[in-house]
Every structure is written in C-alpha cells, then in structure tokens.
C-alpha cells in the first residue's frame, strides 16, 4: 500500500471548539479500546525494566489532551512504576484541558528544552503526520531532550486497516475524526520504514520494536549514557 499524504483537519485546528473537543474525545476512546494505552504501558515498562528504575519523567509531544500518557501513568502505578507526565502541543486549544503535571506550547521540531531534560520523550499517533525528513528531525530532537529513551507509538499502514476506519466511522462523534482516521492510515509508515529512520540515529544505543493489536506499532529507542 503506497503512502499517500492527505491533510488532516485536526492538524490545522480546523473546526469549531466543540468539533475539536469531540475529535480529541474520539482519540481517547480509540486508544482505550484498540490497544494504544496497553502498548504505551509496554514501552514505558520496557525502559523501566532495562534501566532498573521505578520512577520516570516523560515529555509527551503533540500530546493533545495527553489522555494516553495520563491513563498509562494511572495503570503503571498499579505495577509499581511512577510516571511524571509533561505534555507539549503546538495548539493551546488542544492542550488546555490536559490533566498532567506540566503543559507547554511549542514546536515538535525545535523542542524548547535543554539536552537530557526528561527521562523519556514520547509521541503517540504523531510521526505519520510528518514527512520523512521532518520525522528524522523530530527523532533527533527527541533523542537530544531524552535522558534514557525515546518512545514512538503509531499506526501501521495496511489496506485492511484503511477499510476498517470506514467501517468504524459510526463510532466517531466528530466529522474531523471521520475524515482524519482513513487519512491517517494512508499516510502512516510501515514498521520497516520507521526502523530505517532509526538506523544510525545520533546518540542511539539501539532500539526494540513491537507490533501490536489492530495495526499498532511501538519503538523504544535507547539513548547512550553520557
């Protein structure tokens, strides 16, 4: 399936405040129902086990309302892992209601933080919004700001996945989601394409990759210790 870029409405903050809120709510339910939170927890737990730590700070980039890392932090507490979540988004209208410790408005391609500011830097359902050179630039920025690892959680491009977004359209509350869901699948990357982006990433100490339920994928990119 060839990658096709169609502009997504939520990217441009299109729609009324009510439509944007409904679309962000759709994303929250999609992540809860279709394995996004479960996969995110697995990525964090992979770092915690390898680094032998039970407390981590995390910056979630392009976070929206940060529902996914917030819910993951709640679940991880039951496993003995404390996750301190900060969130960054380029739109104040998206992040205003985020229930996390710290919120920032900024550019994912020029993160406004010093080197090694957070244990983890994560992105969820964001990388496919970027063209390959932009994605590589973001990954370099994320690696710069992370102390321990970069977490990438995204969709996998697949014909069946694309068809399922149309079949599931009645579940979506917002017209933005009904447009953006199939567009996201068509512009998503494959596991192999992201693996190639991660090869020879500066400061990387290797990565692990997970394919998950319903065409999700996750990567943990470990950072070299200084």
Image (spheres, helix red, strand yellow):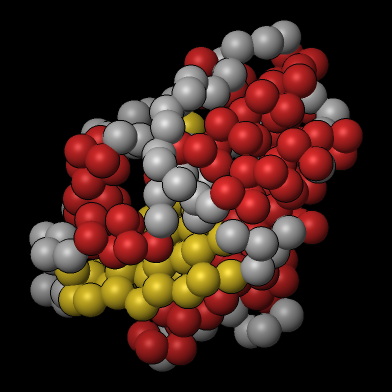
Locate residue 200 relative to residue 120 in the image: left or right: left
Location of the C terminus (image quadrant): bottom left
- Indicate whether 196 appears above or below 226: above
Residue 15 lies, with reference to residue 39, above or below; the image says above
Q: Is residue 70 visible?
A: no
223 to 91, vertically: above or below: below
Measured from the top left, where is residue 195 in percent x and y? 29, 64
| Rendered residue at 58%/49% (across/down) | 159
| Number of numbered labels in the structure image | 0
Q: Position of residue 136 (x, y in %)?
A: 22, 46
In this view of the protein, which residue sits in the foreground, 83 or 156? Answer: 156
Of residues 29 and 71, the one drawn nearer to the viewer in this rendering: 29
Q: Quadrant of residue 28?
A: top right
Q: Is residue 223 left or right of residue 184?
A: left
Is residue 69 something that shows in the picture?
Answer: yes
x, y percent for residue 22? 79, 27
Question: Which residue, as the protein is rendered here, is positioned at the far right?
Answer: 170
| Nearer the observer, 213 or 2 | 2
State the residue at coordinates (54%, 52%): 158
| Residue 41 x, y percent position in the rendering | 60, 71
46 versus 7 height, above or below: below
Q: Residue 43 vs residue 71: left or right?
A: left
Q: Name the residue located 26 percent from the left edge and 41 percent from the top edge.
A: 132
**What residue is drawn where x is 72% and y is 9%?**
16
């Amino acid at each position: 399936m060839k990658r096709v870029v169609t502009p997504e409405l939520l990217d441009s903050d299109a729609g009324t405040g009510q439509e944007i809120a409904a679309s962000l709510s759709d994303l929250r339910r999609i992540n809860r129902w279709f394995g996004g939170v479960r996969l995110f927890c697995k990525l964090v737990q992979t770092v915690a086990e390898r680094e032998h730590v039970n407390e981590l700070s995390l910056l979630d980039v392009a976070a929206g309302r940060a529902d996914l890392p917030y819910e993951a932090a709640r679940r991880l507490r039951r496993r003995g892992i404390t996750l301190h979540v900060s969130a960054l988004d380029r739109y104040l209208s998206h992040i205003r209601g985020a229930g996390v410790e710290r919120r920032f408005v900024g550019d994912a391609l020029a993160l406004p933080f010093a080197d090694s500011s957070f244990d983890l830097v994560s992105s969820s359902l964001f990388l496919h919004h970027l063209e390959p050179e932009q994605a590589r630039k973001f990954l370099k920025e994320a690696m710069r700001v992370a102390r321990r690892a970069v977490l990438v959680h995204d969709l996998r491009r697949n014909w069946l996945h694309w068809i399922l977004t149309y079949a599931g359209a009645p579940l979506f509350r917002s017209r933005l989601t009904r447009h953006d869901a199939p567009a996201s699948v068509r512009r998503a990357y494959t596991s192999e394409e992201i693996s190639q982006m991660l090869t020879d990433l500066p400061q990387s100490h290797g990565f692990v990759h997970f394919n998950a339920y319903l065409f999700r994928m996750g990567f943990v990119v470990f950072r070299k210790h200084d």
